[in-house]
Image (cartoon, helix red, strand yellow):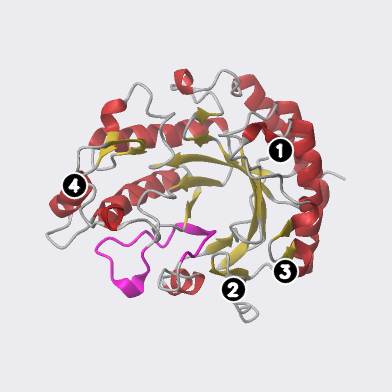
C-alpha cells in the first residue's frame, strides 16, 4: 500500500533522520517513460523505500528538459509535463525525489554549445566529458543547472555528482601526474596558495555547489571518489555538511568509510560490489541481487561498506550508542544502464524488482 501524504506535501528523503532507503536510477543513459517511473514509485512505496535518486545526466545524454537548458535534452527526454506527473506520483507515494546533475565529469552532453568550458590537459588534449572548474563561467553554469534541477524536483536533498573526474588508481603515470590539468592547479594556487593542488580546485567547486544547495534548503550529497579526508590535511576540505555517497574504495591506501566519518561527514552506503544492478554489454544482471560474492540478502547489511573493490572485503561500521546522532544515514541500491539497449524498459523493471525486494528486507531488518 502506498504511503499517502497530505495535499502539496513534499516527502522527506530520510537523510535528516538516518532512515534513508534509496534507489538510484540511471535516467541519464536510458530513457525510462514517465509511466514506468510512476509505477516504480508505487512499488517502492509498498516496499518501504524513502527516496528515488534520479541520475539525470550522463556523458552522451541529458534525460530531462532542464528549465533554461532545454536544448541540451535528448529527443526522448522527460518534458515538464512528464516531470510534473512524476513529482505528483512521488508525493502520493511518500517517496522523495533526489535529482542529480553529474558534474564536473560525465559532462559531454551538458557541454554541447559550451565547448570552451571543456578541460584541457598539459599536452593540449581537450577532454570533452570534463568541465574546467577553474573558470568562473563554469561555476556559474553548474550553479544554474543545480537550480534548474531543484526547480523541477522539489525535496529536501540534491546530489552533486562529482565522480571520476581525476585518474583512477590503476591508470598510468601520465594520468596520475599532479599537474595533468594546469588550469586547475593554477586556479587553486591563485585562490589558496602555492601548496594548493588540482584537488583543491575541485573542492572549491564542490563547496560552492554545496553552499548553493543549502541556500535552497537541500541536503547536498556527493560521490566519494575525490573526497580527501581530514587526516590528509587538504588545503580545501570538502564541507562536512556534504553527505558522502560511498560507493567504492579502489585500493587499501585510498580513503575508506572510516576516513569520511572521522572527517565529520555523514554517509550513505551505495556499496558498488553488493548494491550495483548494471545493464552491461557483458551481460545482464543476475536476478535476486546476485553478484560475484553471492546473493544480496546473504551478503549485504546496511552498515557494510566496501573494504576493497572486487575483493570480497567489507568494512562494517559499528552502531552508535542510543541517543547519539547516527552519521550512517542509510543505504541505496543503484540501477546503472551502461548499455541501455540490452534490455527493454518493462524487462528492466521486472528484473530490477527481484533486487528491490531483498534490499528492502535487509533494510527493514537494520
Work out whether 42 lies above or below 241: above
Whole-angstrom CA distance, mark 1 to mark 2, is: 36 Å
**Helix, strand or loop at mark 1:** helix
Q: Is residue 353 visible?
A: yes
Is there CB contact under 8 Å for labels 3 and 4?
no
Is there CB contact under 8 Å for labels 2 and 4?
no
- Residue at 40% over, 42% down: 105
Neighbour class for label 3 at 10 Å: few (<14), some, many (≥20)? some
Work out whether 272 lies above or below 61: below
Neighbour class for label 4 at 10 Å: few (<14), some, many (≥20)? some
Q: Which residues are magenta?
A: 228-250
Whole-angstrom CA distance, mark 3 to mark 1, is: 30 Å
Q: Which residue is mark 4?
A: 182
Question: If you read the primary sequence from the N terminus, does the residue marked by circle 3 or circle 1 appear first?
Answer: 1
From the image, state whether disc 4 or disc 1 is nearer to you. Answer: 4
Question: If you read the primary sequence from the N terminus, does the residue marked by circle 3 or circle 2 appear first?
Answer: 3
Work out whether 113 lies above or below 219: above
In screen coordinates, is 110 left or right of 200? right
- Residue at 74% over, 65% down: 294
Q: Is residue 366 visible?
A: no
Question: In x, y percent, where is residue 325?
Answer: 57, 72
Amino acid at each position: 500500500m502506498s504511503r499517502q501524504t497530505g495535499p502539496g506535501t513534499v516527502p522527506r528523503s530520510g537523510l535528516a533522520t538516518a532512515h534513508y532507503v534509496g534507489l538510484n536510477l540511471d535516467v541519464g543513459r536510458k530513457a525510462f517513460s514517465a509511466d514506468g517511473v510512476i509505477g516504480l514509485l508505487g512499488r517502492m512505496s509498498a516496499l518501504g523505500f524513502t527516496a528515488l535518486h534520479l541520475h539525470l545526466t550522463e556523458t552522451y545524454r541529458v534525460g530531462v528538459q532542464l528549465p533554461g537548458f532545454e536544448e541540451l535534452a535528448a529527443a526522448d527526454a522527460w518534458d515538464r509535463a512528464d516531470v510534473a506527473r512524476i513529482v505528483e506520483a512521488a508525493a502520493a507515494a511518500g517517496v522523495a525525489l533526489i535529482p542529480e546533475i553529474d558534474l564536473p565529469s560525465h559532462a559531454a552532453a551538458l557541454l554541447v554549445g559550451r565547448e570552451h568550458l571543456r578541460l584541457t590537459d598539459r599536452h593540449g588534449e581537450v577532454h570533452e566529458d570534463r568541465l574546467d572548474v577553474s573558470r568562473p563561467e563554469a561555476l556559474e553554469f553548474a550553479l544554474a543547472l543545480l537550480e534548474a534541477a531543484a526547480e523541477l524536483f522539489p525535496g529536501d536533498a540534491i546530489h552533486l555528482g562529482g565522480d571520476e573526474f581525476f585518474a583512477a588508481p590503476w591508470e598510468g603515470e601520465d594520468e596520475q601526474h599532479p599537474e595533468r590539468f594546469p588550469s586547475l592547479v593554477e586556479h587553486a594556487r591563485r585562490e589558496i596558495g602555492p601548496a594548493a593542488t588540482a584537488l583543491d580546485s575541485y573542492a572549491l567547486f564542490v563547496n560552492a555547489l554545496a553552499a548553493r544547495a543549502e541556500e535552497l534548503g537541500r541536503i547536498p550529497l556527493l560521490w566519494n571518489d575525490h573526497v580527501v579526508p581530514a587526516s590528509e590535511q587538504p588545503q580545501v576540505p570538502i564541507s562536512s555538511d556534504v553527505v558522502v555517497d560511498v560507493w567504492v574504495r579502489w585500493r587499501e591506501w585510498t580513503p575508506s568509510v572510516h576516513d569520511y566519518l572521522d572527517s565529520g561527514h555523514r554517509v550513505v552506503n551505495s556499496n558498488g560490489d553488493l548494491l550495483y544492478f548494471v545493464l552491461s554489454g557483458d551481460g545482464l544482471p543476475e536476478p535476486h541481487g546476485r553478484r560475484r560474492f553471492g546473493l544480496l540478502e546473504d551478503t549485504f547489511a546496511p552498515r557494510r561498506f566496501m573494504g576493497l573493490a572486487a575483493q570480497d572485503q567489507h568494512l562494517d561500521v559499528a552502531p552508535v550508542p542510543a541517543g547519539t546522532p547516527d552519521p550512517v544515514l542509510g543505504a541505496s541500491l543503484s540501477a546503472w544502464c551502461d548499455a541501455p539497449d540490452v534490455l527493454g524498459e518493462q524487462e528492466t523493471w521486472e528484473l530490477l524488482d527481484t533486487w528491490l525486494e531483498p534490499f528492502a528486507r535487509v533494510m527493514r531488518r537494520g
